[in-house]
Amino acid sequence: MDDVDRTLLAALQHDATQSYAALAGQVGLSTGAVHERVRKLREQGVVRRTTVDVEPAAVGRGVLAFVLVEANAWMGDHPTRDALAALPEVMEAHVIAGPASLLVKIRVGTPEQLQASLRRLFQVEGVTGTQTVVVLESFFERPLDPYPQTP
Amino acid sequence: MDDVDRTLLAALQHDATQSYAALAGQVGLSTGAVHERVRKLREQGVVRRTTVDVEPAAVGRGVLAFVLVEANAWMGDHPTRDALAALPEVMEAHVIAGPASLLVKIRVGTPEQLQASLRRLFQVEGVTGTQTVVVLESFFERPLDPYPQTP
DNA sequence: CGTGAAATCGTCATGAA
DNA sequence: TTCATGACGATTTCACG
C-alpha cells in the first residue's frame, strides 16, 4: 500500500468506469501493472466493492434523519445488529460512546414513513427511547479519500 | 423510471463491475436496451457516479465520529458549506432541525486527529459549540436500495 | 427494444529489470 | 516482486430495423 495505490483509490472513487489505460496514465504505469494492483486491493479487502451512487430523492428516499437510540441494556451485540439490518430504511447503525447507545441513519420517502420507522425502532428489544434529528438540507456527502500516510 | 430501472439500480449497487449482458439477463432485456437505460439514468442524475467502496481503516481513516454543531447564526448558507467542504475529514454535512444547527460526519485516523478536527470546526464562522458522538463499532453501512414505488 | 458489427477494453501469458 | 509488452476474447457502444 504505497502512494500509487492511494492515487489509484482516489481516482477510482472519483470515477470507477474509467479504463485501466486511463488509470495507468495517471500513475505512470502500464495497464498490466495497474490491473494487478487493483486486483490486489480488491483481494485484500481495501476495495470492498464497486458500486453506484444513487440520488436518494429520485428513488423515493428523499427524507433523511439520524436517530440516537437509548437502551436499557447493552446493545452492542448481534441480535440488535440483525434487528436493525432487517429494517431496509436503516442505512447505517453504529454503537456509540456518548448520550445514547446507538446512532442510526435512516432514509425514507415521507415523514409518515419516518414515523413508521421510529415505531419499528421502538419494537427492537431493549430500546427505551429515541431522539430524532431530521435533516433539512444536505450540504454534501462524499466518498472517503485516502489519507497521505498512517503514522 | 419503472421497476426495470429500479432492478437495474439495485443490481448496479450490488456490483457495478458486471457486464451489460449480465444485467440484461436479470431484467430480461437485450444488452442494447439495458445500455440505453443505464445511460439515461446517468444523464438524468439518478446515478450520480460509479465509485468504489473503500475500507476506511485500510487507508488511515479508522476513527469515526458524528458532531452536532451549534451556532449563533443561520448556518444554512454557502460560506458555511464551503468552509466545511474544505475540511477533508468531513464526510457529510447536513443542516438539521433539532438540538443544533448542523450535523457533520467525520473520519480521521487517530483520536488526536479528531481533536484537531474539532478545533478546526470551532474556527468556522459562527460556531459556538460542538457535541461529539464517537463511534465504537459500526454494525453496518450500506447503499441505498430503491423503494418499490413513490406514492 | 432487438440485432449485429466495429472499436475498445479487460485479461492473461511471457519475459525483463 | 514488480513492471512492460503483446495478443486474444469479451464487452461496450452505436446505427439501423
Image (cartoon, coloured by chain):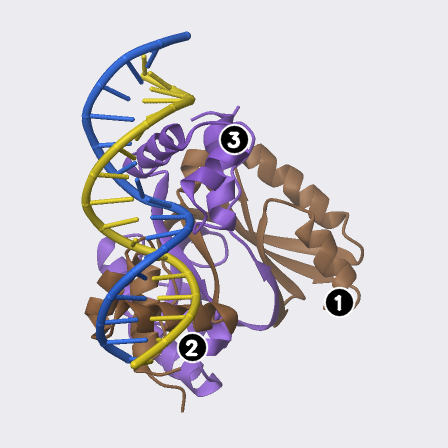
Chain colours: A purple, B brown, C blue, D yellow
- Vertical position of residue A134 compared to residue A99: above or below: below
Q: Quadrant of the N terminus of chain B?
A: bottom left
Badge 1 local density, few (<14 within 10 Å), some, or many (20+)?
few
Residue appearing at x 70%, y 61% in the figure: B70
Give the amino acid type for the residue marked by disc 1 in the picture: Asp
What's the mark number on residue B77? 1
SS under mark 1 = loop
Q: Chain of mark 3?
A: A
Q: Looking at the picture, how far across and down is residue B4, in whole percent? A: 30, 78
Chain to which the residue tagged by mark 1 belongs: B
Amino acid type, mark 2: Val
Disc 1 with disc 2 on a shared chain:
no
Instruction: Looking at the picture, tell me which residue is in the foreground, B141 or B48.
Output: B48
Residue that badge 2 annotates: A59
Q: Quadrant of the C terminus of chain B?
A: bottom left
Residue A35 vs B138, above or below: the answer is: above
**Mark in front: 2 vs 3:** 3
Tell which tag, 3 or 1, sits nearer the viewer: 3
- Chain letter of disc 2 in the image: A
| Identity of the residue furthest to the bottom in this view | B151
Residue hosting label 3: A27
Can the viewer see residue A7?
yes
Q: Earlier in the sequence, mark 2 or mark 3?
A: 3
Residue type at mark 3 is: Val
